[in-house]
Amino acid sequence: MNQPAPAPGSLRDLAYEAMRERIVEGVWHPGRRIVERDVAAELGISRIPLREALRRLHDEGLVILVPRQGALVSPFTPADVSDLFDIREHLEELAARRAAERADEGVLSRLREPLRAAEDARARGDERGLALANATFHTEVVDASGNALLQSIMDPLATKLRWLFRLTAVRDPGEQCAEHARLYQAIAARDPEKAGALARAHAAAGRELSMRMAQEWSDPHFNPVTATRTRRRGPHP
Amino acid sequence: MNQPAPAPGSLRDLAYEAMRERIVEGVWHPGRRIVERDVAAELGISRIPLREALRRLHDEGLVILVPRQGALVSPFTPADVSDLFDIREHLEELAARRAAERADEGVLSRLREPLRAAEDARARGDERGLALANATFHTEVVDASGNALLQSIMDPLATKLRWLFRLTAVRDPGEQCAEHARLYQAIAARDPEKAGALARAHAAAGRELSMRMAQEWSDPHFNPVTATRTRRRGPHP
DNA sequence: ACGACGACTTCGGTATACCGCTAGCTTGCG
DNA sequence: CGCAAGCTAGCGGTATACCGAAGTCGTCGT
């Protein structure tokens, strides 16, 4: 409902996706400054669509905006990780529950698709394709819940999760596949209780490891206001 | 973390709050067109900050943006109400749980404040102040959870709830006060299970009535694309 | 009289230009 | 030599202007 992700017709969507990918893929590190004019020039667009994209990234928590000072890539603290998993566990459970209640053949076939793609990718040893398929499965479960508001909330969370996994590279994808398959079974069996429980446990599974990983690259004394300073940048970063 | 609601220093925040209030207070009805130039002129600002405010309202679900055609106040369908309550029940439970786990005297005193304000307002027969105090209590519970991400998610939901209650004017505020008091007791007793259950039940309480009310003003055949047409507006709406 | 086609109007999308705040350098004084 | 006040320029905030897409209305032909 919110993100017309496909067909980035407007320059704003283009800027949004370009910057989001740079952040999620780690090209732009947490804490890195984002100077509107520079990025706009780099993308070959003007500042207006870029600004609008920045606001959206800010609302989704990927970027910090310091009024009258500028923007920077948001840090990812252990507290953020904890907060993220807290909410994720609850909402993934909700999504799985509703999906199990509403499951019809059309929904189920859409859920099977990423499961199959994941198997394929695993067979090919395609690490990247596997991660994508697993992420798609989660998205499909949320879609299957039929709750548009839930979709609009989970979408930014999924982005953050993707970011987190990219930064930490945690969890065995094979194990995830097995858990996804079990969740699918519960949904197909129209068992909301079981589906909800499985989804929650699945979401919780990566928590501890992610938290530990997050301890490392996070700087507890990070301060966005001081981070936006130092305007004269060195000749070569 | 997201909304620096106080001190709308920038014109963007000014525009955001102005438009949000008009929508929530029902001055701008669901389905009403929003023409950028007109509103910008009315607020005495240019289109850029207004546009950025519009995007935000769009991301929060108060406004629909039809590419290359324009904006309009989002409709509020029964499905939206259902979706909203689904998520609210889960997240209010989470918030109450965490609040109960973390409750210290500082937190508790902040929670008592709106309870007291609500009593005052009720004694004075101040309907409006009572609603505000009740809403504040919910916000404080979320704050007390210590989950910044949860705050940023609940804030737009709270706005939508305010909108919904303004459109429907449902539930007995007195009953709500009693339920809030019980929830406070559970949090003060550091009983996460009980606090969570109470919060969930409290959130669920208004659901049926709101749903029925929503049936009335909603037009099931509403289509945003056709709604943005008719550019020549009547001389006097 | 009715339908199709075309020009005009409106309004969102984007670029360009200006303003003013603020950080950090610089300079001068203690 | 250290610190403080003023100066400078980078960069976010906002306004203005232009462009192109999309809808509406008028007109012409049948």
Image (cartoon, coloured by chain):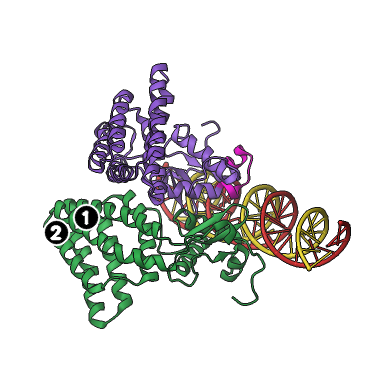
Chain colours: A purple, B green, C yellow, D red
Numbered tag placed on residue B69 in the rendering = none
Q: CA distance from mark 1 to mark 2?
A: 9 Å
Mark sitting earlier along the chain (1/2): 1
Residue at position x 18%, y 55% in the image: B197
Q: Position of residue A122 (x, y in %)?
A: 38, 20
The answer to whether residue A188 shows anywhere in this view is: yes
Chain bearing tag 2 is B
Image-quadrant location for residue B160: bottom left
Residue at the limit of the structure toward the bottom, as seen here: B124
Q: Amino acid at mark 1?
A: Ala
Label 1, residues with CA under 10 Å away: few <14, some 14-19, many ≥20? many
Q: Position of residue A29 (x, y in %)?
A: 44, 35
The answer to whether residue A229 shows anywhere in this view is: no
Q: Amino acid at mark 2?
A: Ala
Chain bearing tag 1 is B
In this rendering, do the residues under marks 1 and 2 share a single chain? Answer: yes
Residue at the limit of the structure toward the left, as seen here: B189
Label 2, residues with CA under 10 Å away: few <14, some 14-19, many ≥20? many
Say which element carries label 1: helix
Against A123, residue B122 (above or below) is: below
Q: Position of residue C19 (x, y in %)?
A: 62, 61
Against B97, residue B161 (above or below) is: below
Overall secondary structure of the magenta section: helix
Against A23, residue B227 (above or below) is: below
Q: Position of residue B76 (x, y in %)?
A: 43, 62
Q: Are marks 1 and 2 in contact (CB under 8 Å)?
A: yes
Numbered tag placed on residue B96 in the rendering = 1
Residue matched to label 2: B186
* Magenta residue span: A38-50
Residue at the limit of the structure toward the top, as seen here: A124
Q: Is residue A169 magenta?
A: no
